[in-house]
Amino acid sequence: MTVTDSTTGILFGGDYNPEQWSEDVWADDIRLMKQAGVNTASVGIFAWSSIEPEEGRYEFGWLDRVIEMLHDNGIGVILATPTASPPPWFSKAHPEALPTTREGVRLVHGSRDTYNPAAPAYRAAAAAVARALAERYGAHPAIRAWHLHNEYGTVSYGPLVDAEFRTWLQARYGDLATLNRVWHTSFWSQGYAAWDEILAPQQTQYLPNPTQVLDFKRFSADLLLACYQEQIDIVRELSAAPITTNFILPPWLHFDHWNFADASDFVSIDHYVDAAGADGAAHTAFGSDQARSFARGKPWLLMEQAANTTQVGKRILAKVPGQVLANSVQHVARGAFGILFFQWRAPYSGAEFFHSTMVPHAGENTRVFREVTELGALLGRMGELVAQPSAADSAADTPVTGVVNRPRVAIAWDADAWWAAETAGLPSDGFSFHRSARRVHRALWFMGVNVDFVRLDHDLSRYDVVLVPSQLMVTDAQAASLRGFVEAGGHAVVWYFSGTFDGDLHIIPGGYSGAFADLLGVRVEELLPIADGETVELDDGHTASDWSERIELRGAEVLVRFAHGSAQGRARGGAQAAGLPAITRNVVGAGSATYVSTEPDDAGLAAVLANVLARAGVEPDAPGAGDGLEAVRRYAGEGSYLFLINHPDRPRETSAVGTDILSGTAYDGPLTMEPGDMLVLREASASRPN
Ligand code: GAL
């Protein structure tokens, strides 16, 4: 099961939708693909109505021709199942399989993702088309991999979902007494006497039951996983090609990345940069660090990115010249074995006609297509990065297995914790798991420090620093795991309100952040959220916002105190913490646990991180990295490669030893990187860790 080998090098290409074009355009596609160095096309993603125009009647002729044409021209195919976009005949025959919103509105056909994952008719139709494709193409030599569905993430409500939800709850709780206890249904007269009284949490009069909502999110994620698994089982029976589904990485979450990655042969992500300049580069690093982390040693691929556009607020901005090259190399630095785009050719009509493409509306004689071609050539010079790492790994017969980067710092990432932070009725509506994780990741990126994501109950022993920015809900196993990590010499940083809830979303008695209280050496007696828009001063000269607490020290030392509140603070809450501990540290065994009970400003956050990194002896991968000069070490074959990228700003000084595989130039010591410069240095000295 290999997606890449010594002949393919790094995969390069994108979504290819020839069914949207007349066949006379196809030959021109091939000409331009060859010109750009494209070696991979993802085909069929939304082609259900072209493949199965009527129930059970398949039209494979066009797809046969497309696959043969690509194959004849040396372009590998990642074949999709089209199940994210049911055709009109399906919705007409099965209106119950359309999605229903939380407000109870059943949506109609006319876009994509118009399906209800709990509808038996949808599941059967999806399984049938997946089987038909796998039977026909499962053994075709052009098929490098399977791309099942597109961006799982549709949530639905309604009677079919209610029934499935009850089945899921019965399996989880066994009996109603247990469910009533865990959901604490004595509050507001919600005690259930029969299973069929239970509904999915649709829009109701006032605040919903918190654990019911959390369980529904868990259930919905499991339902999507079941849809994925059904297709995996069918395709696996009929094809040896590896299987993936493309993860969407937005600020909302409807599935659990960890278990979707476990079910996949390799991970793939779609990454759409949402900021300009260095912040866009930081966002790119965030996405690819997630992909590598979720993959946990399996290979990973960038399945989609935009060739030219960035959605910033309400405008679609153009990427600056060179940006798509730098962003792509960032992904490769962090382990990607392929760089693909949405999509190949710009359509002149259809819903997404202004999403940028590899071949723009204006054609091949454009800056964008020239950069795409330049990128193809650049990736073509990096083929050695997908070499088999070692005899042991090649026995597993997958490319790029094992360690590709080795960050010593990890950020806790957990779907339950994300959903817990969305609970209605918390003391602040400002919690966002995604925003907190991203803020800490961004701060580290600007400090030049590379980072993984990890679930707290995974093996933490390979890290020196574990950061817990917004893990409101923690299981006993996760709390014990973090404690074990610190006792063994690790350094943890935990942010406010983390560890306040147990795995059932019940507040742990005895003080907030109770799951971590012993480890942190504090007792959080009272929550003192700070009013919106207020800032308070800390005694290290930084400011903070959003949150403060009345903390009693139980062994921890104070690193920083709240100095005094804002001008209006006393009336609005901000000043109440004046003089109280803001940041503390507890020494435990050979390690330490720092607690940050507020939201420091950017400089304050960097100071907290610098403090713990210094304690753990963590440094960037190259001298001078940070603030837009990116240094990432990637392991491949038996050796290592140092990626240096100077995101356009100003010349930067660093130092490195090795040969740049892009230009063949050898470097041996101090060097200046001009804005936009990129080097991929094959290092003679470092060797691949286990
Ligand atoms: C992705 C999706 C693609 C396309 C793209 C546009 O999320 O998978 O099909 O819609 O966004 O940016």
Image (cartoon, rainbow, N blue to C red):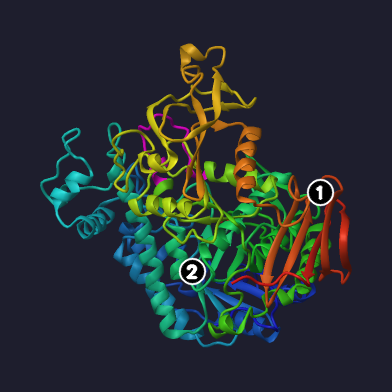
- Front-most of 408 and 156? 408
- Residue at 39% x, 78% y: name it: 234
Can you tell which quarter of the image residue 451 is in?
bottom right
* Residue 670 falls left or right of residue 620: right
User: What is the span of residues highlighted in magenta in the rendered image?
Assistant: 419-434
Residue 420 painted magenta? yes
Q: Residue at the location (55% across, 87% down)?
A: 140
Q: Name the amino acid, label 1.
A: Pro
Kindly identify the residue that appears in the image at 64 percent across and 39 percent down. Answer: 606
Element assignment for label 2: loop
| Residue 254 at least partly seen | no
- Mark 1 lies on a secondary structure that is loop
Residue at x 73%, y 76% (from the top left corner): 383
Looking at the figure, which quarter contains the N terminus?
A: bottom right
Q: Position of residue 426 (x, y in %)?
A: 38, 32
Q: Is residue 76 above or below residue 641?
A: below
How many neighbours does mark 1 have within 10 angstroms: few (below 14), some (14-19), or many (20 or more)? some
Label 2 CB-ligand 1 distance < 8 A:
no
Q: Main secondary structure of the magenta part?
A: loop
Q: Quadrant of residue 343?
A: bottom right
- Between label 1 and label 2, give the one nearer the viewer: 1
Spot occupied by residue 315 in the image (x, y as percentages of width and height) = 66, 41
Q: As shown in the figure, which amino acid type bears the numbered disc 2?
A: Pro
Q: Are marks 1 and 2 in contact (CB under 8 Å)?
A: no
Classify residue 445 as left or right of residue 62. right
Disc 1 and disc 2: Cα gap in Å? 40 Å
* Residue topped by disc 2: 82
In the displayed structure, 686 sits above or below 98; it is: below
The residue that label 1 is drawn on is: 648
